[in-house]
Amino acid sequence: MDLVTTGVEKYQADLLSVRAMGLTYTTLLSLVPFLAVTFSVLKAFGVQNQLGPVLARMLEPLGPEAVAITQQVITFVNNQQVGVLGAVGVAGLFYTTLSLIGKVEEALNAIWRVRRPRSLGRQFSDYLSVVLVGPVVIFSALALTASAHSHWVVQRLLELKPLGIVIPLVTRVMPFVLLCAVFTFVYKFVPHTQVRLGSALLGGLVAGLLWQVAGVWFATFVASSSSYAAVYSSFAVLILFLIWLQVGWQIILVGGEVAYLYQHPGTYHQRTAGGRQDVRWREWLALAALVEITRRHLSGQPPTDPARLAAALGVPLSSLEGLIEECVKGGILLRAAEPPGVTLGRPPERIAVVEILDTLGGAGPLRLAGGGEDQILGVLQRRDQAIRQALTGVTLSSLVCHPPRTE
């Protein structure tokens, strides 16, 4: 139960309900342009006929109204004359399409505590690859699955008793497998951080299961919501469509939370241990990260990525990113562009441990706001002076090469 509570608290802290609303609004604006671009790409590969059935399947929880919505959307898409839009119109069409993926990345980056999003160049190239390649792979797989029954080899296999039972079962399960694969792809490649395949796979499986359960629940809700049609009349379809979009985006974000918590179990352990990052824990984490970076520096290895560093230390990336940013501002670390990562800003023998603690605010000089003096301030100043004297001459280099003894 504590793990579920941790997930719920993180979901609320990340404001994912609000982000799901924003994604719902963005989807309404970019749905037709996105499908128009997808239709154009699919048409070039001859699999455009799969767009309608897939869209109808995704809207299946809306009940009989799903057919009307699908036909209306497909009509809008067919009416999009991409060839007569001109350069500006086509650019606007692609911008609207790419903005939807950008909003998805922004929401997932918030889950993964990513502070530095993709550059504009990376956004354009990565998003465009997803738009141009992703639909072709997905719809081609669906087309192959749908046409498998008509192949003579499959027909022969169906005549065999054991395989005749297994193959229809596999055919029914295949859409669910493809759905989980799409979610896994989103969790693996959309966040601008290193996501392990196992974490993305677990998130995709959970999101796929939730999608199926939510679909059954929503279909039941639509079947018993005749009063909504009486109140909202023809607007009832639009309202139900908006609700399903909201539910769908919340499921996708929940899957992202599951992937994050699985990859960073320290988030759960930190909560059960007290749920607060005090000064001593921040100092330990910063020094541990700097020692690891110093080891790589002394061995001639390239700069390390903060995500890899967090995984090596067994802590959430969110806990480490803020400390790295403070060290970068203090000149202790530098961000490298190629290969991307962080490295020491100066030789390790010139970086004193006291300087690091001052940068983190743990050993800086204390002064009263009004400039006055009292006995308590004097005690704290003597403590800081004692710490400075005890750490005189201790640098990152000496900390790595001659670690202090613990008795």
Image: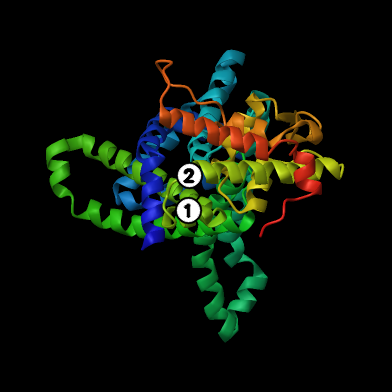
Q: Which residue is mark 2?
A: 277
Residue 121 % position (x, y): 68, 25
Q: Residue at x 52, y 80 (%)?
A: 165
- Residue 6 lies, with reference to residue 391, above or below; the image says below
Placement of the N terminus among the 4 image quadrants: bottom left
Residue 259 % position (x, y): 52, 53
Q: Residue at x 52, y 28 (%)?
A: 99
Mark 1–mark 2 distance (CA, rounded to whole Å)? 8 Å
| Residue that protrudes farthest toward the front in the picture | 375
Q: Residue at x 29, y 53 (%)?
A: 218
Q: Which residue is mark 1?
A: 270
> Which picture quadrant has residue 12?
top left
Q: Is residue 77 visible?
A: no
Horizontal relation, residue 407 to residue 295: left or right: left
Q: Nearer the viewer, residue 380 or 246?
A: 380
Residue 396 % position (x, y): 75, 39
Q: Residues within 10 Å of mark 2 (few under 14, many from 20)?
A: few
Residue 29 % position (x, y): 42, 27
Q: Nearer the viewer, residue 200 or 320?
A: 320
Which label number is shown at residue 358? none
Placement of the C terminus among the 4 image quadrants: bottom right
Q: Residues within 10 Å of mark 1 (few under 14, many from 20)?
A: some
User: Label 1 sits on what residue type?
Assistant: Gln
Horizontal relation, residue 399 to residue 320: left or right: right
Q: Considering the numbered disc 1 on the image, is that residue within a helix, a strand or a loop?
A: helix
Tell me the mark number nearer the camera, choosing from 1 and 2.
2
> Which picture quadrant has residue 159?
bottom right
| Residue that protrudes farthest toward the right in the picture | 300
Q: Is residue 306 visible?
A: yes
